[in-house]
Image (tube, coloured by chain):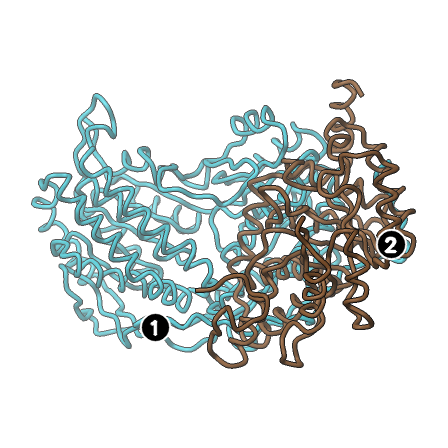
Chain colours: A cyan, B brown
Amino acid sequence: MPTRKRNNPAGSRLIFGDLWEYDPAPETADPKLKGRYDLFIDGRFVRPRSGKYFPSINPANERKLSDIALAGPADVDLAYRAAARAFPKWSAMAGRERGKYLFRIARLLQDRAREFAVAETLDGGKPIKESRDFDVPMAAAHFFYHAGWADKLEYVAPGRRVSPLGVVGQVIPWNFPLLMLAWKLAPALAMGNCVVLKPAETTSITALKLAEILQDAELPPGVVNFVTGAGETGALVMGHPGAAKVAFTGSTEVGKAIMRQLAGTDKKMTMELGCKAANIIFDDAPIDQAVEGIVNAIFFNQGHVCCAGSRLLVQESVADRVVAKLKNRIRVLRVGDPLDKNTDLGAINSRAQLATIKRLVASGVREVMYQPPCALPERGFYFPPTLFTGVTQSHRIAREEIFGPVLSILTFRTVDEAIEKANNTAYGLSAGVWTDKGSRILRMSTELRAGVVWANTFNRFDPSSPFGGYKESGFGREGGRQGLIDYVNLA
Amino acid sequence: MSPRNSTAAHARLLDEVGAVDQVGVEERVAKYTTRSVKKEAKVWGLKTAVSMTDLTTLEGKDTPGKIESLCRKAIRPYEAPSVPTVAAVCVYPSMVRHARAGVGSSGVKVASVATAFPSGQTHLRTRLAEVRGAVADGADEVDMVINRGAFLSGEFARVEDEISEVVEACGPAALKVILEVSELETYDNIRKASFLAMGVLRPGDFIKTSTGKTTLNATLANNQVMIEAIRDFYLDTGIPIGMKPAGGIKTAKQSLQFLIAVKETLGDAWLTKKRYRFGASSLLNDLLRQLEKERTGAYQAPYHFSDASESY
């Protein structure tokens, strides 16, 4: 035998101490924030009719970043009217001309990438390495991709004629503020629609900074309008009679409320909602890379990911090994100041979300919880990476979306059991499969009821790849040709 | 061994040690390159890298004079007293006597490549005799190459037996087992060979990536596969094995990335020259140059440092 038997009575352990501590490495680019942000309507920044503003704070230290305008019914109405005025000319414009605007937006965003990355991190709490290496470049990529489609609309649905819908109302979440905005704006604009969009109330800043880019790109006034505010403003955007279609990304709860609100109207809808995704590890998987995939699946963006792999299903024969390796791996995750380039887990987006996470974690069984030792900053909203072992399908932490850095670990014995457990959820946005066996990957990808099935990877995105859910995770697709079809009339 | 038995042997060993996913491991190591090491942490890393260096010359044209010069550099890499000595000088067996005399009582070790380095393609008795000769001449450490032909044809017992015999021939000298990763080609094979070697090594011995004589040498990814094998082996058996990436690490920045990988995979206990080495020659001067930059705030010209090969 090449390896010696396990005879480790001394219980050898790895030491992840402070022998070589990294010095603070804060990103220093200027985010160029304004003290106050107005609404962006008809190509201009305008004060809200109500005159009311609300603060946007930095979740990393609870300090105020800026005041954001609160849009009421009159403001939303103005935005829709501006969009309706802009629509005839914008939709009649040759696709290649519309494409030029999108290319321009993408390039301007790239030019100001560091500035946007810092603003995104300050406003939302995500680690700078993620906003710098993922959010901003991906947002630019979505504009580039859809710019390329703008003059090829006849190939979106071969054999059929496509035409834009009109004015589209969109509401986006706080977990990927700029990226979700790009996912929504780019296809809508490429197809010739005009937009009224509401960013999440805790993360409005990068949308309003993008409005500056839209001005620089000389996008015709009214084609894109941003109205800011909380849920009431969102309901106004979704329910406005001027919307030909609404697109929503957020929680299943709010998604259902919107659908009830719109029942009986002829508005088109797409919904991208919550999930409790299964990440399935088979015994023949490359374990170290699977562990890396588990970390990426649940701790990416503090677990504030709609498709996060929050339910880990491990085959019983390797469960102990996987969990032991996972525990060692998360001991070296660095939790803290999101602006530090070495931070792996930043701040939880808001006080309210932190309370939700704590409440759901409290419902788990303490005895089987593992949190690595890590010092959290005193101010700001933070939560350590957390594992629950020995979870069963009936536990609340295995069923409800926590939307935080909390992983529930379950085991299975056979392939059929894995499929059954993975599908035993109200959701179906994504799933992950880790195995060395190609045929098993193909089988899992057809039997798992999830919009995306990742094989030997997790949380991979591309503008050309459609994304969307099954069951209560929503309907409609974003990205790729499929995503475009949701923004046109087919004839 | 017949091809069929060979396949079965590889399959059994892979089953035992577990597979490695190429895409996954390369993504993992890419994350190390985004770590930002500044100020005091940088100085600590640079000095530690100096102290871990096996300053190497392995050329047909090596002479006692060249070895003497190498030893001087090893003992006193730079005039600043805060710069440590390197870990060892690494030479061919015929140069061991001269290196022994050159390092004297400085604490710098003498390492010798042996076993018909770099190919290993000669009789076992000849290879063992070479090891004994090097140790008799005063080598503190021996760098051997494994029998890649035997490994690839599935003759694992032979690979292990040969390493065992070299261990015995080493006596008190520490052994570093070179897997020659570029000839093993896959990460699966690198992991398998790591376990084969570790199974017969003593605590304090090393596994090493490459001879530096082939096209592809140490990379962050094959370093990662090997240190993960070392970690798994240590957690299973309690036996700590050292690691030496060699060849291709030319810049201080690269060496810091390797050390970050060690810190985040094996932990603090491996951040010492007793368990981690760099097999390198030009790396040392770049480390010194970066240390001077941290001390003075300005980059010195390459010719400011002794034995620098590059110039403007």
How crowded pointer 2 is (Cα within 10 Å; few <14, some 14-19, many 20+) is rated as many
Q: Nearer the viewer, residue A90 or A38?
A: A90
The residue that appears at 54% across and 55% down in the rendered structure is: B31
Determine if marks 1 and 2 fall on one subunit.
no
Q: Quadrant location of residue A491?
A: top left
Judge from the rendering whether residue B121 lies leftward or rightward of residue B305; answer left or right. Answer: right
Which kind of residue does numbered mark 2 sit on?
A: Val
The numbered dot on residue A30 is: 1
Judge from the rendering whether residue A136 lies leftward or rightward of residue A195; answer left or right. Answer: right
Q: Alpha carbon of mark 1 to alpha carbon of mark 2: how far?
A: 60 Å
Judge from the rendering whether residue A352 lies leftward or rightward of residue A247; answer left or right. Answer: right
Judge from the rendering whether residue B57 lies leftward or rightward of residue A199; answer left or right. Answer: right
The numbered dot on residue B135 is: 2
Q: Is residue A411 above or below residue B68?
A: above
Q: Nearer the viewer, residue A97 or B107?
A: B107
User: Subunit of mark 1?
Assistant: A
The percent coordinates of residue A300 (x first, y second) are 52, 54
Name the mark nearer the viewer: 1 or 2. Answer: 2
Q: Nearer the viewer, residue A429 or B35?
A: B35
The percent coordinates of residue A61 (x first, y second) are 47, 75
Q: In the structure shown, which secondary structural element does the residue marked by tag 1 occupy?
A: loop
Q: Is residue B84 above or below residue A386?
A: below
The residue that appears at 16% across and 53% down in the rendered structure is: A80
The residue that appears at 73% across and 34% down in the rendered structure is: B148
User: Subunit of mark 2?
Assistant: B
Could you tell me which quadrant the N terminus of chain A lies in?
top right
Which kind of residue does numbered mark 1 sit on?
A: Asp
